[in-house]
Amino acid sequence: LKVVAVNPNGTSQECSSCGNKVKKPLSQRMHNCPVCHGSLCRDLNAAMIIKNRGTRGLKAQSMSS
């Protein structure tokens, strides 16, 4: 199992589908993107962003090896 550190900044504000920044207060628990019309739980959206960043980090590491 390989672990990759990712920058968690902005994960709850970024759309996991299109990358658009969607500002919202912490009290808003749903992520609704006005660009791609994606709608899902804020925490699930953030988890998907973290997964995507980690995957990119792994690919970058393997390409530089």
Image: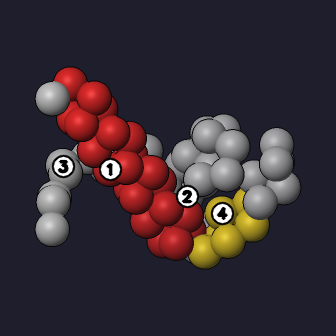
Q: Please, what secondary structure does the residue beneath circle 2 have? A: loop
Q: Which of the labelled discs sits on residue 5, or is there none?
A: 3
Q: CA distance from mark 1 to mark 3?
A: 7 Å
Give the mark, 2 or 4, whose residue is nearer the N terminus.
Answer: 2
Residue 55 screen position, x and y as percent: 37, 49
Residue at x 62% of width, y 40% of height: 19
Give the mark, 1 or 2, whose residue is nearer the N terminus.
Answer: 2
Colour theme: secondary structure
Residue 59 screen position, x and y as percent: 33, 39
- Determine crowd level at label 3: few under 14, some 14-19, many 20+ residues with C-alpha closer than 10 A: few
Residue at x 32% of width, y 50% of height: 54
Q: Which residue is mark 1?
A: 54
Residue at x 75% of width, y 66% of height: 39
- Determine crowd level at label 4: few under 14, some 14-19, many 20+ residues with C-alpha closer than 10 A: many
Q: CA distance from mark 2 to mark 4?
A: 11 Å
Give the mark, 1 or 4, whose residue is nearer the N terminus.
Answer: 4
Q: Please, what secondary structure does the residue beneath circle 3 have? A: loop
Residue 11 in view here: no
Q: Which residue is mark 2?
A: 25
* Nearer the camera: disc 2 or disc 4: 4
* Nearer the camera: disc 2 or disc 3: 3
Residue at x 16% of width, y 58% of height: 3
* Nearer the camera: disc 1 or disc 4: 1
Taking depth in this image into account, of 56 and 31 the one nearest to the observer is 56
- Determine crowd level at label 1: few under 14, some 14-19, many 20+ residues with C-alpha closer than 10 A: some
Taking depth in this image into account, of 41 and 65 the one nearest to the observer is 65
Q: CA distance from mark 4 to mark 3?
A: 24 Å
Q: CA distance from mark 1 to mark 2?
A: 25 Å
Residue type (three-letter) at the residue carrying disc 2: Pro
Q: Which residue is mark 4?
A: 31
Give the mark, 2 or 3, whose residue is nearer the N terminus.
Answer: 3
Left or right, residue 2 beside residue 21:
left
